[in-house]
Amino acid sequence: MDWGYFKELLMGGVVKGSIYALIALGYTMVYGIIELINFAHGEIYMIGAFTALIAAGVLTVAGFPAWSILILASAAAVVWSASYGYTVEKIAYRPLRGAPRLSPLISALGMSIFLQNYVLLAQTSNFMPFKNLFPEEGFLENISEVLSATEVIIIFTSAVVMILLSLFIKYSTTGKAMRATAQDRNMAMLVGVNVDKVISATFIIGSSLAAVGAVLIASNMGQINFFIGFIVGLKAFTAAVLGGIGSIPGAMLGGLVLGCTESFGTGYVSSDYEDVFAFTLLVLILIFRPAGLLGKSDIQKV
Amino acid sequence: MKPILDVKNLTMDFGGLRALDSLDIDVRPGEIAALIGPNGAGKTTFFNCVTGMYNPTQGDVLVNSPSGYSTRLNGLKPNKVTERGLARTFQNIRLFQNMTVLENVMIGRHCHSGAGHEIIMDPDNSPVKRMAASAFFGGMEIAATLLKGKRFKEREQETVQYSYKVLEKVGLEKFANNFAKNLPYGLQRRLEIARAMATEPFLLLLDEPAAGMNPQETKELDDLIQRIRDKEGISILLIEHDMRLVMSISQRIFVMDYGKKIAQGTPGEIRTNDAVIKAYLGEDIDA
Amino acid sequence: MGEILKSLKAAIWFMFLTFPIMVIKVNPIEDTVVWRWMNMAYIGVGVFFLSFLWRFMLARRNQGKKAEESGKARMPIGQRIAEEPKIKYPAIALVGAFALTIPFWADMYNTNIMTNVLIYVMLGLGLNIVVGLAGLLDLGYVAFYAVGAYSYALLNHHFGANFWVVLPMAGFLGAAFGVALGFPVLRLRGDYLAIVTLGFGEIIRLVLENWNEFSMGPSGIANIDRPPFFGIKMDLFQKTDFMYYVVLALAILTIIAVTRLKNSRIGRAWIALREDEIACQAMGVDRTKTKLMAFALGATWASMAGVVFAAKSTFINPPSFSFWESVLILVIVVMGGMGSVVGVILGASIIVLLPEYFREFSEYRMILFGGAMVLMMVFRPTGIVTAMRQKYTIHK
């Protein structure tokens, strides 16, 4: 057994996994509250990446310093992703509350296709090179043999963001309202929770997290196109289901497990089947443990 | 005479919550029995346990059909329970809204109208035999449907006729080709009863059949329920909040509170039962 | 005034929202930026007016719902026309005559396109069983299409198998695949089912792409035989025409089959399951068996359509069986009308023909389909043609 190789794969898996987790949080939060697979979530992430790319491009031309570009471009990605998330909910999901379950699902799929092609038409169908937004500073080099500086930043940032989110959900008023709505929407409404606002807030927070993930992953991968949201979205969804959809720690755990599975699968079996590992894991988990690793099996209300 | 439904020591836990606690309830042949209790007492949960929606944590659900067959229902799927002769309605109407009134009843005929249903439904056959029959006749039925053979058409016609007769019994025949969603509320409740009757049950479980009805409609429902018992020989167990209805039509009443049975007896006995009065009116009323 | 203000707000919001993507275009290599301010103006004006329309339509929809609840809803015009025998039968005759004579007056190119329409009619009707009637969202439908196409292509390539032999075989194979996949996953809730089928579809495509020894990988299989006709030699034109008639016959068979299924005991159980799963089970319907039947029958048609597709195009490779193909078929069903046979035929025609005959439209094809899916669900979830239910007459 080659420990160096193993460690490399493990770290690769953790890096990938933390980003899946960031995006999975968006799926899980939305599902927890309105029981909808938000197919368009992957596209929100893609739009975040494009917004960051555009903002960084404009700021570079205007001659801003590297650190300010990182901060401003990330902020732009978060703001616009959140706005798209909010708008998508208002247009494609809100009018469908109370409709048969199939309707919002098809609407979500339609929204996803729409957004993909919107970016395709307004921007480009080609891959765009994405400059690493993290400036090359001396103290970031050579932290470890297996991890690049960017990768360390990815793991660190994801961890911080997730801790902040957990605290927010646990202690803030909005967070409490979210948990109440997830438990029982009608009851929450009766005790004075503005459910519409809570749902909007959920979409905004989920989309912001996706934007953070987008900036991180794009910096690491070095290129983006209009289609990146689909596969990443699907994988993040897998992570969410793996951990137990609706559960926030579950999404994090699911992301890490999925990232490592992929990493070891491609490293030890075959890199041709990278996506097959993820899908197989998804199919197996749904068949054998549909509630996920940390989820509770729910009892159907009659 | 043996009770047709004999529930013993039924317990249902949801996580840490005990929704039903060692419940004993029985329904005798030809009887109208009622299950009452404050909201949240566990009445609907009881129905769900009996009809296979939930699998009870403990206890037995036994049925003794009038045809002399006895069986245990625990853990059976809802459709299997229906095949054994129990049918139910729902508290919040659950009709097939985008199907016609007649088609709703025809769905009730489902387990009696399929090819080979005698073999599939006969509880004497082994599960393997029933499953094999189910798969085989399923394939045959697809073929028959595609070829639209004579036997297939006859069977369809039988289903239509039978369902129409059921509609006549509840007085909905003139709405046969309307969509279920276009029926007024009171008639939707009736349609739910008709749909359940089409499954040829010997016990009908009605979950708040009078909810949301005006006094006139309730009166008509009262008549309908008695007629079903008298003319069709179907026994009835109903959950109901309308005390006037309960007291007037049921022979025996079971009272539940917090998942436990707190009383049972004739309407007269229940009316004067201290535990029941307490449960409904609160503890400090006797001051 | 309030309405104008609302529209104004919407316009400003969308101008802000679309600002980075619509207005700015950067070239990260040369570090240049193009500003397209006109786009912002278009968005502003467009949203301003569309916003009125959106609110008007929403209000109308909600009114319609209320009317329905009070039982006052009028029968839609389309339905009244379709139920009028004076219009119904001549219309069927007209469409039939049109379909039958196409090869006589259309050139090879257009006959080919009509063959495509018919293949999508088959696929759409097959998926309609699964999605429209049984209410199971299958996003990996194309996997069964691939099963059929590859089984014919491979059998023909290796053993020279005859189209007419493989066609029924592929039907059964598709059904077997449907049962094998359906058995474990049909217990899942609707939205999970969508994802699992999507995953399954992608697995099949990735395997076809990578397992070179079996499927010849991305380069695909070429020189697949067209269907033979009693060994008569035909030139390319005749072959195209014959192919058209073969597909037409199969499509008509599909139409008959789906119509019969729809108004049968099985079909009723599907619809009831779609309407209310719990009530349906409580009425004695075996949920797993009923769903499996829908899944297997849907797969049967997809698989047979796959055989036809392989024979028609004489060349297949994995990209023909991507997720987008599944989406396209789904759009046909959703647009046309879930559960409606006429709707699916209409949907297939629109979705295949529009991009063919309006080339400039083809670039915007996917964005329009995506938008249409959302709008359909919001304003007309039953599709262009609302599915009707059979009326029964009672013999006394």
Image: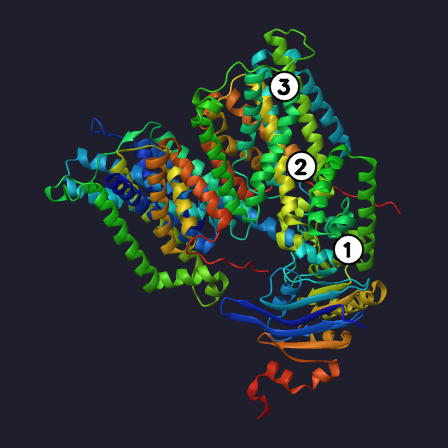
Label pair 3/1, CB-CB below 8 angstroms? no
Q: Nearer the viewer, residue C36 or A272?
A: A272
- Disc 3 with disc 1 on a shared chain: no
Q: Nearer the viewer, residue B230 or C39?
A: B230
Q: Chain of mark 3?
A: C
The kind of residue tagged 1 is: Ala
Q: Is residue B209 something that shows in the picture?
A: no
Q: As displayed, is residue B189 above or below residue C266?
A: below
| Dot 2 crowding, Cα within 10 Å, few <14, some 14–19, many 20+ | few
Q: As displayed, is residue C62 above or below residue C128?
A: below
Q: Nearer the viewer, residue B15 or A92?
A: B15
Question: How far across and how far down the image is residue B256, in percent?
Answer: 63, 76
Q: As displayed, is residue C210 above or below residue B40?
A: above
Q: CA distance from mark 3 to mark 1?
A: 47 Å
Q: Which residue is mark 3?
A: C163
Residue B198, numbered circle: 1
